[in-house]
Image (tube, coloured by chain):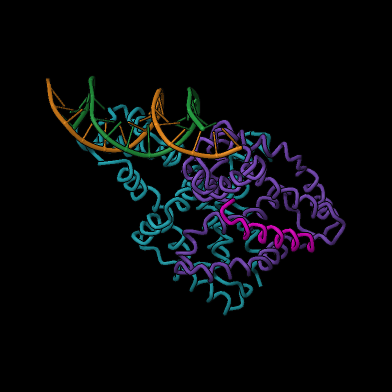
Chain colours: A purple, B cyan, C green, D orange
DNA sequence: GTCTATATCGGGATAGAC
DNA sequence: GTCTATCCCGATATAGAC
């Protein structure tokens, strides 16, 4: 097994374990096992656990955010943007359901590291806010503060994933299929909820 | 220092550290330091870290939930209920801002333990759902699934606290006062957002 | 009930052979 | 580049004196 493939295998294994167990809960041994290699090899490729963790973060997590920006800056009806963003975002999360809890955990453990990564991603939330302000001026939506709008949107999309382990038990007697269905419904319902809330 | 006071001091110290650092990030030493006692004494009162942790959980966290139930089962206007619950809940969270991240972390680490605690608290969400259904029948609100309504409400209240460390940086250049103000606004704005979204 | 000292263990990291 | 063996440290937990 040559260099490139091993590194990739490690990163994939590390991502899987980190997301499932959190940074603290993850052991190098567990990653090595999953990657079917030796523990020492991890240190050969990535000097220590911190560096490995940061690499995983850069490599995978921040592919999420640019999508919001792109959609909001595009030239379509504002309510349609909301429908697209919500659906897009929930779909993406469905494929990576453990990321929200992981990110929340991480941002409370080490906010600076995460923030730094975020800056690197070059996202411009201010531009998104501008598009919202324009809609207010055009009288298409109520006079909502862009920051509140933004946080409300994220809350409604992300929270059900972050709290899934408990919510699935509380609301659906731990029925996985039922919760999947619930999430599926939210792909459209959430957008309509938001639109109702803000339309003028 | 006799028995009772030491135990109490330990529980308070443990709560503070657990909430700030999470379960994994907390060391017995840190708790001992905060309680101004010796490490060994922790094991004398609570056999091990797990038992101490569980005790803290039982003792403090689940005082939160019954408040939602009480308000929703009371006999006032439904929209007014929403205003009260939102304000009440966000206020409560303002006084315990680390709890959401802590709970999310914990529910992803060990959902069964948390769920068990929740059952012990005896909360009856189904009763809350009943009140929502009645409002739909009375045509006061749109035909929203109670579960979606419930999760939307929780999302909008809790998420800004769970993600505060990052959001404060991203939205307010890490200005604590500004974020406090933002939260303060949400005590009323969030309820109106929800009411707009669901009113018939 | 509270302390000091210590046993024990798990996990990150390194040395060194191949 | 990959392995085995080992070091080392931090953290839980216990023993035992007072």
The residue positioned farthest toward the bottom in the image shown: B137
Dominant secondary structure (helix, strand or loop) of the stretch shown in magenta: helix
Q: In this view of the protein, which residue sits in the foreground, C16 or D6?
A: C16
* Position in image of residue A95 (x %, y %): 63, 59
Relative to B51, D8 lies left or right = right
Residue B139 lies within the magenta run: no
**Count of marks placed on residues:** 0
Relative to A119, A41 lies left or right = left
Q: Quadrant of the C terminus of chain A?
A: bottom right
Q: Residue at x 31, y 47 (%)?
A: B55
Q: In this view of the protein, which residue sits in the foreground, B14 or D12?
A: D12
Q: Which residues are magenta?
A: A79-99
Q: Residue at x 61, y 33 (%)?
A: A112
Q: In this view of the protein, which residue sits in the foreground, A85 or A11?
A: A11
Look at the image and tell me whether residue A145 can be seen.
yes
Q: Residue at x 84, y 62 (%)?
A: A77
* Position in image of residue B50 (x %, y %): 33, 45
* Position in image of residue D13 (x %, y %): 26, 38
Residue B198 placement: quadrant: bottom right
* Position in image of residue A9 (x %, y %): 60, 47
- Whether residue A156 is situated above or below residue B185 in the rendered picture: below
Q: In this view of the protein, which residue sits in the foreground, B36 or B139?
A: B36
Q: Quadrant of the N terminus of chain A?
A: top right
Residue B53 placement: quadrant: top left
Look at the image and tell me whether residue B161 can be seen.
no
Q: Residue at x 63, y 63 (%)?
A: B195
Residue A90 lies within the magenta run: yes
């Amino acid at each position: 097994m040559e260099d490139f493939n091993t590194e990739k295998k490690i990163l994939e294994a590390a991502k899987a374990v980190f997301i499932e167990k959190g940074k603290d809960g993850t052991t190098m041994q567990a990653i090595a096992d999953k990657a079917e290699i030796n523990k020492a090899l991890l240190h050969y490729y990535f000097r220590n656990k911190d560096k490995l963790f940061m690499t995983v973060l850069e490599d995978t997590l921040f592919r999420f955010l640019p999508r919001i920006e792109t959609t909001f800056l595009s030239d379509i009806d504002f309510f349609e943007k909301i429908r697209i963003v919500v659906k897009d975002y929930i779909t993406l999360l469905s494929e990576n359901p453990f990321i929200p809890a992981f990110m929340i955990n991480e941002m409370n453990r080490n906010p600076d590291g995460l923030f730094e990564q975020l800056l690197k991603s070059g996202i411009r939330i201010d531009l998104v806010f501008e598009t919202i302000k324009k809609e207010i001026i055009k009288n298409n939506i109520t006079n909502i503060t862009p920051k509140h709008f933004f946080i409300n949107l994220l809350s409604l999309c992300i929270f059900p994933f972050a709290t899934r382990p408990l919510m699935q038990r509380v609301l659906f007697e731990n029925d996985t299929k039922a919760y999947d269905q619930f999430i599926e419904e939210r792909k459209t319902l959430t957008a309509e909820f938001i639109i109702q809330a803000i339309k003028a």
